[in-house]
Image (tube, rainbow, N blue to C red):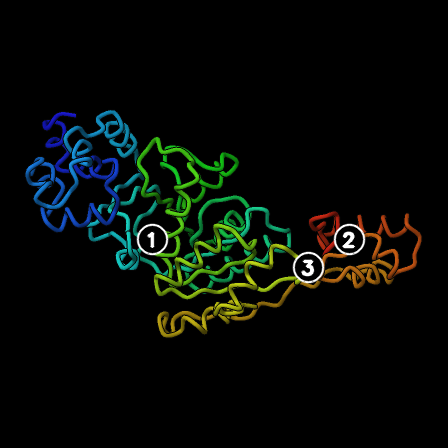
């Protein structure tokens, strides 16, 4: 990359070069910017100025020889409509995100970057989410959207995808924070979801184009999810999971942490129960979230007027008895046989009908579980 190319872009290429400089993380980059004022002056300072600023000699190479090909790729990506670059010094850089330790020095965005200034609530949880868990995430996201909050998540499978879909289904926007460059979608099966979010919301990443889905990038991504938000709601989580990392980061950033309890028999409840034991707010409804955030949200945020729920068609007595026997805890087929003392073929038929009607779902291990809406 030549200096003429940098000047041509009025400093944009300098920013991109700083984002791509190997070994220079957010804290170091912000310290250098505080000393030199802007990326152009930083690069112009040269090795002598960098050394005087305390930058180790081992990190000088990335500033002396910026990654020309990668910067050109970033510039080509940014040339397309609806794509934006928001550096630390830009007035549109999210104010809440500025407050966190190790805040990214810049954000790549696709969609409407003005949404990042809105008040947000993050919803995260297990990738291998149960069907009831996915419905819970989607339902909370829809209700929070109707209340005026913007739902933020990480575009992952499971709870993240359900949260994004719930917000969109409620007619709102949503924020997706990615752990890759925005020239690719991960996971690939969320390509259509990402397209819809970019059209109606905004997709965000601190990583430049070409960055693959590396394992170490996702914990970094998580601090942005929590950093953009007033609080984090965890729906389902295993004891060791990225969702708990996000909750831990949220607590360290001074954000509220909410957790939905679940069955004591489900491994996906152990993470949320651990959060509750350590101070997260036990959450059963959107009201619990709004109540906790009332001082920050003010009176304008409130649950919408109650809507009469559509009543499900009444079941015949036999299927109602099977539904009641299934219950909301995962229940095995053998246990149902014991409880109901009915012929196996009749039980199989009733369970199939209830599943097709959306009243029950299969749980891990082949068990059955009643859905909340049934």
Mark whose residue sits in front, 2 or 3: 3
- Total labels: the figure holds 3
Q: Quadrant of the N terminus?
A: top left
Question: Is 56 left or right of 159, judged from the image as shown?
Answer: left
Provide the residue designation for mark 1. Answer: 115
Q: Nearer the viewer, residue 58 or 201?
A: 58
Which residue does the image show at 23% across and 28% down from the upper left? 67
Q: Crowding near pointer 1: few (<14 within 10 Å), some, many (20+)?
A: some
**Mark 3: secondary structure:** loop
Query: What is the C-alpha distance between the residues marked 2 and 1?
Result: 41 Å
**Mark 2: secondary structure:** helix
Residue 82 lies, in percent from the top left, at 31, 39
Provide the residue designation for mark 2. Answer: 354
Question: Is 93 left or right of 350, judged from the image as shown?
Answer: left
Q: Quadrant of residue 302?
A: bottom left
Residue 288 lies, in percent from the top left, at 50, 71
Provide the residue designation for mark 3. Answer: 265
Answer with mark 2 or mark 3, whichever residue precedes in sequence: 3
């Amino acid at each position: 990359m030549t200096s003429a190319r940098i000047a041509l872009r009025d400093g944009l290429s300098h920013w991109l070069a700083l984002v791509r400089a190997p070994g220079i993380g957010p804290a170091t980059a912000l310290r250098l910017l505080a000393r030199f004022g802007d990326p152009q002056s930083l690069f112009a300072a040269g090795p002598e100025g960098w050394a005087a600023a305390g930058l180790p000699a081992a990190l000088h190479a990335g500033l002396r020889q910026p990654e020309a090909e990668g910067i050109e790729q970033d510039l080509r990506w940014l040339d397309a409509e609806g794509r934006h670059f928001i550096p630390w010094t830009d007035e549109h850089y999210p104010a809440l995100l500025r407050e966190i330790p190790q805040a990214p020095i810049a954000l790549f965005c696709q969609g409407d970057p003005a949404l990042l200034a809105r008040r947000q609530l993050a919803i995260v949880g297990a990738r291998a989410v149960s069907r009831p868990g996915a419905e819970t995430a989607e339902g909370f996201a829809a209700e929070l959207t109707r209340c005026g909050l913007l739902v933020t998540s990480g575009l992952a499978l499971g709870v993240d995808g359900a949260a994004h879909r719930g917000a969109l289904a409620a007619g709102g926007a949503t924020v997706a924070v990615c752990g890759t460059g925005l020239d690719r979608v991960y996971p690939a099966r969320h390509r259509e979801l990402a397209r819809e979010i970019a059209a109606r919301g905004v997709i965000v990443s601190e990583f430049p184009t070409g960055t693959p889905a590396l394992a170490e990038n996702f914990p970094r991504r998580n601090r942005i999810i929590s950093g953009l938000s007033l609080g984090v709601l965890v729906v389902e989580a295993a004891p060791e999971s990225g969702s708990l990392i996000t909750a831990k980061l949220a607590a360290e950033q001074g954000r509220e942490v909410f957790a939905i309890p679940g069955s004591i028999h489900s491994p996906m409840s152990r993470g949320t129960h651990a959060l509750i034991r350590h101070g997260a707010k036990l959450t059963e409804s959107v009201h619990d979230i709004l109540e906790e955030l009332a001082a920050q949200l003010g009176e304008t945020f409130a649950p919408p007027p109650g809507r009469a729920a559509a009543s499900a068609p009444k079941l015949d007595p036999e299927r109602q008895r099977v539904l009641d026997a299934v219950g909301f805890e995962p229940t095995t087929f053998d246990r149902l046989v014991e409880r109901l003392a009915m012929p196996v073929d009749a039980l199989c038929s009733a369970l199939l009908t209830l599943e097709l009607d959306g009243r029950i779902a299969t749980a891990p291990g082949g068990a059955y579980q009643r859905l909340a809406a049934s």
